Amino acid sequence: MTADRSSQAGGGVVVGTTTFTARALQRLAVGIAHDVARVSARDVGVQLSDDHGALRIAVTVPVAVASTRRTDLVAGGEELRTGLIEGMRELAGREVGTVDVRYSGVHRSTERRVR
């Protein structure tokens, strides 16, 4: 799961490479899922695997329930799926073929207004 990207200067000379280890990709996916799902990063579980050259992501998150808004699990799963696909493409240059979302438990949060 290591991805190498080469940068070329004028004349075809390689000036360096950028390498993403499997651990770095896994932590990046956890961070993206944490942001999109609005839950603690320690509550997010991510497993990465190969899907015919693309990345397959299995993510486990609790359902985030806020007292002031309605929870639509299907829409939340689609938002998480889209966020992971776009985030991994934009931040790591990785193509994601499949995202499996599994909900485990409930995370209740209270949204407070700032005075």
Image (cartoon, rainbow, N blue to C red):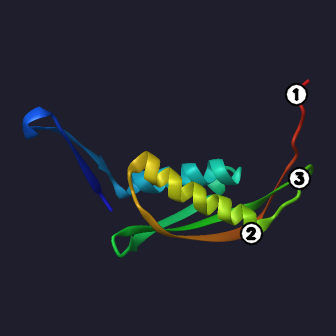
Q: Which residue is mark 1?
A: 114
Q: Determine contact: label 1, label 3, CB under 8 Å.
A: no
Q: Is residue 18 left or right of residue 93?
A: left
Q: Quadrant of residue 70?
A: bottom right
Q: Is residue 4 left or right of residue 94?
A: left
For badge 1, the amino acid type reads Val
Please state the total of marks drawn on the protein image.
3
Residue 100: x and y in percent read 58, 72
Q: Name the residue nearer the viewer: 27 or 85.
A: 85
Identified at 45% across, 47% down, the residue is 90
Other-residue count near label 1 (Cα within 10 Å), few / some / many at <14 / 14–19 / ≥20: few
Q: Is residue 9 left or right of residue 96?
A: left
**In the image, farthest residue toward the top:** 115
Quadrant of the image containing the N terminus:
bottom left
Q: Which residue is mark 3?
A: 69
- Distance from label 2 to label 1 (Cα)? 30 Å
Residue 27 in view here:
no
- SS category of the residue bearing label 1: loop
Q: Which residue is mark 2?
A: 74
Identified at 65% across, 71% down, the residue is 102
First-in-chain label (3 vs 2): 3
For badge 2, the amino acid type reads Val
First-in-chain label (2 vs 1): 2
Residue 89: x and y in percent read 44, 53
Other-residue count near label 2 (Cα within 10 Å), few / some / many at <14 / 14–19 / ≥20: few
Identified at 63% across, 51% down, the residue is 34
For badge 3, the amino acid type reads Arg
Identified at 68% across, 65% down, the residue is 77
